Every structure is written in structure tokens, then in C-alpha cells.
Image: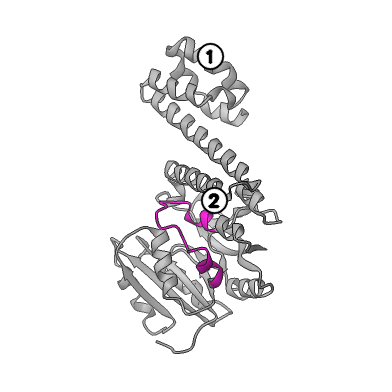
Amino acid sequence: MNDHAPAVSVIVPAYGLAHLVGETLRSLQAQRFQDWEAIVVDDGAPDDVEGALRPFRTDSRIRLLQTDNRGVATARNRAIGHARAPLIALLDGDDLYEPDYLDTMVAAIDHDARLGFVSCDATYFGEAAREGRRFSEFSPQVPPITLDRMMRREFNVFTACILRLAAFNEVGGYDGTLPAAEDFDLWLRLLEAGWQGGYVAQVLVRYRRRAESLSRQTAKMMAALARVYRAAAARLGQRPEAGVAAEMAAQIERQTAWEEGDALIRAGRVREGLRVLRAARAWQRSRRWWVAMPLMLAVPALAKPLLRGRQRWNEAG
């Protein structure tokens, strides 16, 4: 290993990404800013991550960390535990850095010692529906970055951000018990602790969309988000943001129940689905639901036909 302590440690989780991680690492090697190390994490992957790294054996900056599988949060925690730099850059093993990512992001976070993390924008690729479109089109990134605005999703941190190791350690790193939304939880805790967030309004990452990726597993993500908000509300106590956290948790839980009730009805379990929708106050979803819900409760046989128009209702509501 090179004895030189790099300026940035780039953390690359690669579970199930042996076929893509080479392209990711080549985007790292192509950086204008070259004072980095990369820690690639193979946390019990079912594919040959080690084999995928063989072409990079001559680059001493790239290391492989092999562990058992405990989820992406624990994988990142373990890799960051081996980091030698004061700055941590995140790069999933299927995404790509633009050539000026590190140069721009290091300068941004170095500008102010109060910054615990800095985010940027990205473009989608890999899926025709969003090819070439910006992350900020779908997940608003409108500064300023405050705890309240982050909770309300008025500002969304793109995962491939850069953060200060001292800030990460201060809040205890990622919550390894979370199956999803571990990054959102980290940003909230950093802001709660008094660290500030920064934003570079440039596209510095290419974000690959894959049908099997964790971010597409909606039910799992929604359940984890609700848990994150509930935990934040408990931590914040009497702070005004506690009410926002509780409000957002309740909103997500209602949305999850609506989806569950809808799925039950479509599966033929109509009365069970209607009970779920009624408990979740589905009539509050929109004007159309306000009309449809009493009809479905009065005449359950109408529920399934009415839900066939769900897409139009969602667009209207």
C-alpha cells in the first residue's frame, strides 16, 4: 500500500455489480483530481467482484475489502473504517463520476469547515424513460439546505456526495439496522448535530437506473423512510422540526396503507382491502377518492372496477 495519505477516500459498494464496477472505476481513474484512494466493498456478493478488479491490480490506489453481507449501510461503515483520508466520497458500483467530480466537490467542501457534506446534481442513464434527464427534475434540489426543508423533501441529497470524515464519525456513521434510506437518515442526523450541507448545482455524476436496484423497491423504501422520520421525531424532542418529522412519517404510513389496500382489492381480497383503505382515510387522497370511497364501502363489488382507473385518479389527484 502507498504510505501517502490521500485527500479523498472513495467508497464503492459493489454487491452484485461485478459486471459494472469496472466501468465505475475507470470513471474514477479518469478524474482530473488524482489524489484519491478507492475502497471497493465486496460484502458477500454472489458474483465475482474480486475478479472484476483484476484489471486494476496495477493501480495501488484501489483496494478490495471483503466482508460478510450485512447490507449496504454496514458495508459503507466498514469501508469508511479503513479510509485514510479526511474526506469521504460516495460512489455506488454501478454509477459513474464525470471527470470533474472530485476536483469540484473537494473544492466545495474545503471552502467552509462547517460543511459536513456537499451534494451535486446527476443525470440518469440506463433506462429510456429518464435517459439524460437530471436528478433534480424528479427530486428537487432547491437551497438553502435546512433540517426542515430536508425533511419536507424540498432539498434532496444525491447519494454520490462528499462528506467530512469528522462529521460522519461524530454522528456514528450509517445506521446499519436500516434496510434502506440509510443515506437520508445520515443527512438528517448531520444537520441535527449542527453540521451544514452544501450544494454544487452541476451535473457531476451519471446515475444508472436498474429495475432491480434498491431504490426501485418502493414498499421497502417507504417503510424505511417512515422509520427514519419516527426516529428523528423522537430525537428532536421539543424542537419544531419534530412535528415535521412526525407529520412526514404519518403521510408515508398513509400512502403505504393506501397502496396495500389497493393491492388487496386487485388481488380479490376486497373487504380486507377496503378495511385497510378506510383505516388509512383513503378518501382524503383526492376529490375523486372522496367520491369513490363511500361508493366502494356501500357496494364492495364496485371496488375492483373503480380501481382500474387508478392511474387517471392519481394524475388528477
Rendered position, 312 above or below 85: above
Give the residue at x 69% y 53%: 142
What number is the disc on residue 294?
A: 1
Q: For the magenta stretch, what is the residue range?
A: 166-186
Is tag 2's residue or tag 1's residue first in the polypeptide sequence? 2
Q: Position of residue 14 (x, y in %)?
A: 39, 65
Q: Which residue is mark 2?
A: 235
Q: Quadrant of the N terminus?
A: bottom left
Q: Position of residue 276 (x, y in %)?
A: 44, 25
Where residue 198 sits: x, y (%)? 66, 64
Between residues 180 and 194, which one lies in front from this camera angle? 194
Q: Secondary structure at mark 1?
A: helix
Front-lying residue, 19 or 229: 229
Locate residue 268, reporting x and y percent. 36, 21
Amino acid residing under circle 2: Arg
Kindly identify the residue that appears in the image at 31 percent across and 67 percent down: 67
